[in-house]
Amino acid sequence: MTEKNLKQAREYVGISQVAGPLVAVKGIHNVGYNELAEVIDPDGNVRLGSILECSEGAAVIQVFEGTSGLSIPDTRIRFRGEPLTMGVSGELFGRVFNGLGQPIDGGPAPRAEMNMDVNGLPINPTAREYPRKFIQTGISAIDGMNTLVRGQKLPIFSGTGLPHNRIVAQITRQAKIIGEDTSFAVVFAAMGIKHDVAQYFIRNFEESGVLEKVVLFLNLADDPSVERLVTPRTALTAAEYLAFTMNMHVLVILTDMTNYCESLREISTIREEIPSRKGYPGYLYSDLSNIYERAGMISGIDGSITQMPILTMPNDDISHPVPDLSGYITEGQIVLERDLDHRNIYPPIAGLPSLSRLMKDGIGEGMTREDHAHVASQLFAAYSHVKDVRALAAVIGAEELTPLDKVYLEVGDRFEREFLSQGEYEDRSITETLDIGWSVISHLPKEELYRISEEELNKYYGK
Amino acid sequence: MLEIIGKVDKVIGPVVHAREIDKARMLDLVEVGDYHLVGEIVKLDRDRAVIQVYEDTTGLAPGTNIYSAGVPLSVDLGPGLIGTIYDGIQRPLEVIRDSSDQYIQKGIHVSPLDREKKWQYKPSLAPGIGVSGGEIVGTVQETVLIEHKVLIPPGVAGKVTWVIDEGEYNVDETVATVENSDGDSVAVKMSQRWPVRKGRPVRERKPLSIPLITGQRVIDTLFPVAKGGTVVVPGGFGTGKTMIQHALSKWSDADLIVYIGCGERGNEMTDVLIEFPKLIDPRSKRPIMERTILIANTSNMPVAAREASIYTGITIAEYYRDQGYHVAIMADSTSRWAEALRELSGRMEEMPADEGYPAYLPTRLAEFYERAGMVQTLGGDQGSISIVGSVSPPGGDFSEPVTQHSKRFVRCTWALDRQLANARHYPAISWLDSYSEYVEEISGWWEENFGGEWMDLRRRIMDLLQNEGKLQQVVKLVGPDVLPDTQRIVLETCTMFKNAFLQQNSFDKIDMFCVPEKQVKMLQVILEFYDLGLENINKGATIHQIKKLEVTSDIMRMKFSVGNDEIEKIDEIRDKLNRSMQRIAEMFE
């Protein structure tokens, strides 16, 4: 036996302290930071944990499955001598796992082609391929104004009660690359969401016939909260294998990132760390970036990881640390707006705060249409003016507006009713989307369309 | 070289406590554990030390050895820096990729400079001459744009006893020997090392007087920065901080750009890597990559190296400044650097000040920004470092510590505005919240080069914008119709100025870069529109007659329609404006 095997076989009886999900042990051999520990409760059940802090002969372990039922003298500990890994292969599809990557659908563990460290490694920026391939989602507000490209990380900033799940389900149903028939494989990671939400997604995957191309990782609201901290990591490890080893295009849905962050705060508080904003730990940004930055493409490899995290903004506040720090890492954001939802506009995608940073390189001639950039920019400008006019109309009354501003009001309504609003099963092509955009802005006089070139006006204005 | 200086006692993320330490000094570079992870000593207490580790510490166990060569964290300075992309501790990422795989594994040790490559070296000194630190020994054409000057390292002085012949050598070659006052012979190599946390010495600091021309109208005309100046760019997410940094890297007239991607997105660095080699500098007609050095420590790379990346960047910049170049540093984003400080400070259990940041945050910021400036180098040349640091305030709230402290140590602020960004008005630099203290200092340059009225034009448009800001308050309450036409012409002119001048499309072939001369002419036309319009209104014309003039759409489009090499076309637009206004005037005479 090698030294490593010997150490793995050692079992320590008795722990020195339990506090929340943390267990402290003493009198052990020296173990490595972030490596895996097995915590065996008095009933003989094995729970997994990772080492948060290690010093000479001692360690603090964070137990993923919770610490209820552990006792000081009877708990036994073993150390694996390596970080948490996930066994991956093409047989992951159609299977359901818990946050640790263990199957919970009653089936046996899938055959593992290789074991990958769930923490991943940073991709070398020089090895990345810049994403520029347009994904048509069939939703005008996204395709037309906040274009998603393959390999992007584009979160949905939502609020409680808003239809983010329906929008994501629609995107997974409709997402395609024009001119390619490769479909997306889906990795779905649920963190602290309700059973019925998980059911809704599974039903949707079934209905659209993609279930055999879906891998599910479920950590539901009543599952241990510490397990939530590894759920996105195991899911992304599976996604990395599918994308960069099996050359597939993977769409990763992470929901709900707010729950993830709350778990992180929970652990941080128990460890008595110095908090930054709203009690979240100072390393929240670095921690989130370790998840979000695992999206992308690598040059020389066909596959890609496109991330669509969903997060609910507490109290619809976009400046809350979770959406705020996410927005600094992700490549844009789709923001849902309660006011639009109340007016029965689906999808209620807010016109102005939504943004796709990678849009500029994925649109235009040869990708979508030559007028795309200018039309989108003009729609943003016009809608921004509409917001000002509406604010003014609320004060002085719509009758008192200048004739031009009255036209703007109408354009605003049309934009929301005709462009934004669409059916849950309506799959618009990019040409349709842009044509609707033109029909909306064509109500404005030509002089107002200062972000559009002369030729484009001649070709599309009022047509 | 490496000796065992102690053992790992405790590991908490990137912070490692060590015991049985001997022969260690503060800020010494160390290698930790079996993987030889790179770290730096940040605290000493008898035989114990705290080390911040620049790599992922997963698997690092107590009891493993700590090694050190007894030197501080330093960078290699010599030919071959330009066009390279480094991580936060100057490891070349392309070499790392070629030697392993697409991921950055830990414990990789590679040389920052290519030690094999031969450079054509030309000596510029003869034996027998007395020299001192900072003087030029010889030159290497590093890229077409940059002639690399090999310098006597600071602190070395004496008589040159030998120089190498012209020829091809690698960076480790001794190119001259100097006999110092003690009679010792010092070998001067083509490359040298310098500790990153210590500024390189200069002869004296000079006043600032030349603008850093950026080709961005809102910057050059309204809120200019001088060569050697410092700017902070605060803005919430999505307001375009990175876009501004990219635009400046591409189009500003600095000799050399050091771009530090500090804790930001991986794809942004990839974007730069793909785009810059293709972009051609409008002045030198050479690829922009030939004057760019990139430091990329993306958000998911180890946090301690993020802290170091800022220092690595500025030390490299100082080295080129010492060769007599004007260097501009883009630090994107200094908030991530401050957060790295906070994270490390928290793990060392230091007492926090504002929002968990350590109390020494302002000191560190001041030290960094003070390394900018226009200087006379030790060799007698003029060189400068300008710093543009972006700040990412949480929730877009500028009252947070990093924004507030940074503003105390810089003299120019480009405040990015959420409302403007939402309306896709880019660059979203707010004309009401931004300021530049360099206007007076550089006005001489503008007036010398583009006529005496620059200051006056600038002051007039700023007045109009301030005036418009007040009028908008009224409009928000009662609508524009109640304002007299003499005030509505102010609103119209400002709307025109914002759309036709301030807004600039960085993806448009013509508009992405605007020469100073075009900026002056555009501003003249817009102000003339105001003057003549107001004159006509006073004669009895209405605002609608003036708004309806066909020439307004020519003015609106001149940024796209008039190329940088055909600015005289703006004169034609100006003539047309004069004729149109004249026709209105005639109706009332």
Image (spheres, grey):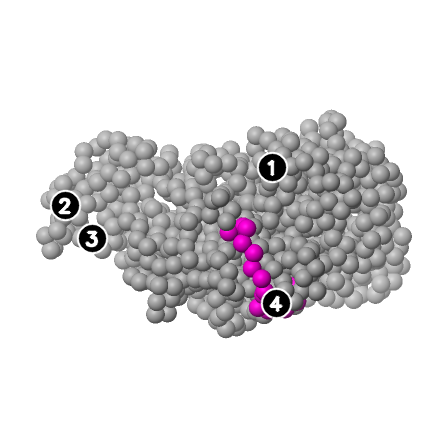
Which type of secondary structure does the marked residue at label 2 adopt? strand
User: Distance between the Cα atoms at labels 3 and 4?
Assistant: 67 Å
Q: Are marks 3 and 4 on the same chain?
A: no
Cβ atoms under marks 1 and 3 closer than 8 Å: no
Report the magenta residues as a range.
A7-21
Which amino acid type corresponds to the residue marked 4 in the rendered image? Pro
| Image x and y of residue A99, in percent | 70, 50
User: Distance between the Cα atoms at labels 4 and 2?
Assistant: 76 Å
Residue denoted by label 1: A114
Residue B343 seen anywhere in this rendered image of the structure = no
Looking at the image, which is closer to me, B393 or A255? A255
Cβ atoms under marks 3 and 4 closer than 8 Å: no
| Structural crowding at the residue carrying mark 4, measured as other residues with C-alpha within 10 Å and reported as few (<14), some (14–19) or many (≥20) | few
| Image x and y of residue B510, in percent | 58, 37
Would residue A391 appear left or right of A450 to someone viewing this image? right
Cβ atoms under marks 4 and 1 closer than 8 Å: no
Residue denoted by label 2: B160
Which amino acid type corresponds to the residue marked 1 in the rendered image? Met
Residue denoted by label 3: B156
